[in-house]
Image (spheres, grey):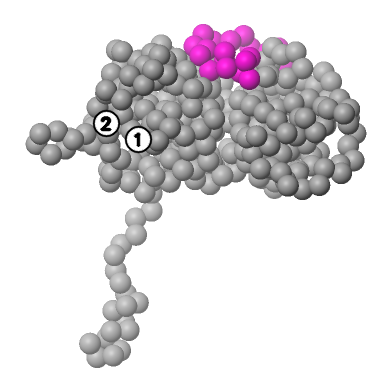
Amino acid sequence: MKIALLFGANSFEHEISIVSSIALKKVLKDELIYIFCDYNRDFYLIPTDKINSKRFSSGEYKKDKKLELKKNGFFQKNLMGEKKLIFDVVLNVIHGKDGEDGTISALLDFFNINYIGPRVEASVISFNKLLTKLYAHEFGVKTLEYKTLQKNSKRDLVLDYPVIIKPTRLGSSIGISIVRDEKELDYALDVAFEFDSQVLIEPFVEGIKEYNLAGCKTDKYNFSIIEEPQKEEFLDFDKKYLDFSRTKRVNEATLGKELTQDLQDSFIKLYEPFFAGSIIRCDFFVLKDEVYINEINPVPGSMANYLFDDFNNIVEELVNYLPSKTKVPPLYRYINKIQSAKGK
């Protein structure tokens, strides 16, 4: 099987996407084709045997073959016209904007290209932390209490400190701050508003348990192990950045059967039906034996490969269970009826 890894794009998480894609080279056993989308949203075919992070930071990638996204695939210009890039499926490894907000999903759907990753609806739901909470409530999964604030709104907030402030539409812990008193509030809001026009404010609960569970659905649910991430107060950008290059399987959290089942049941409620065709990771909180969703990661770092016993097999199996597309026949019945009634 040939898998095209699509990564980069115009995102604050552009570099993280590069790190994730390089890490997958150590994990996936199939033939890999690297398609890089730069900040200008131009596509390049990166030689698999020469890929490294410096190739992108130095701009050396611009010497590689340029690609054009068109109907049914990516194309490379040559002396004879153009040549289609041959692969079986695209694996969306674009983190953040462009990759997780629905932009690339819409393009791949529009141009009829098979891909593993969140579809447009799933992207919209998971990219916006506020919409994630509303979605979770609708499907019976609990969330922590929260407030939202717009960038130009008055900051006359009444809060029970400590709180955690997050940009609403950003991942990888970028722009997140813990605020322990009113004196720290304005600075934390200024930091978050550098990345987004809306922030989410939640209570910061000391010692809350956090568990990560990844998976996808084929003919059955394929769950990863459950990880309890090692953290101090919260997983900041530096700690999460290291996660994106992980390829070795992590240790499984020691949980009872009941809590494991509760986490898996919550995952199922969140996955169906919108996340079909995706390998996602759900980050849960557990407080007083109650499960709360923190975030849905539709394109997790390194695709959460380190949580699976055989990630390569998961990818190969999922290719056979991608959502089918509804074909619309060009019938023009309505117009033909009008013309017929007019005697034309």
On screen, residue 275 versus residue 52, left or right, reads: right
Instruction: Find the distance from the CA under tag 2 to the CA under tag 1.
Output: 8 Å
Mark 2 residue type: Lys
Q: Residue at x 23, y 31 (%)?
A: 86
Mark yes or no: residue 145 visible.
yes
Q: Which residue is mark 1?
A: 42
- Circle count: 2
Tag 1's secondary structure?
loop
On screen, residue 10 versus residue 293, left or right, reads: left
Mark 1 residue type: Asp
Label 2: how many Cα within 10 Å (few below 14, some 14–19, many 20+): some
Q: Residue at x 27, y 23 (%)?
A: 64
Magenta-drawn stretch contains 166: no
Segment colored magenta = 237-257
- State the image coordinates of residue 22 (x, y, percent, origin top left): 42, 16
What main secondary structure does the magenta stretch of the protein show?
loop
- Could you tell me if the residues under marks 2 and 1 are in contact, i.e. CB atoms within 8 Å? yes
Tag 2's secondary structure?
strand
- State the image coordinates of residue 189 (x, y, percent, origin top left): 75, 34
Q: Which residue is mark 2?
A: 66
Q: Residue at x 51, y 22 (%)?
A: 16
Q: Is residue 226 above or below residue 248?
A: below
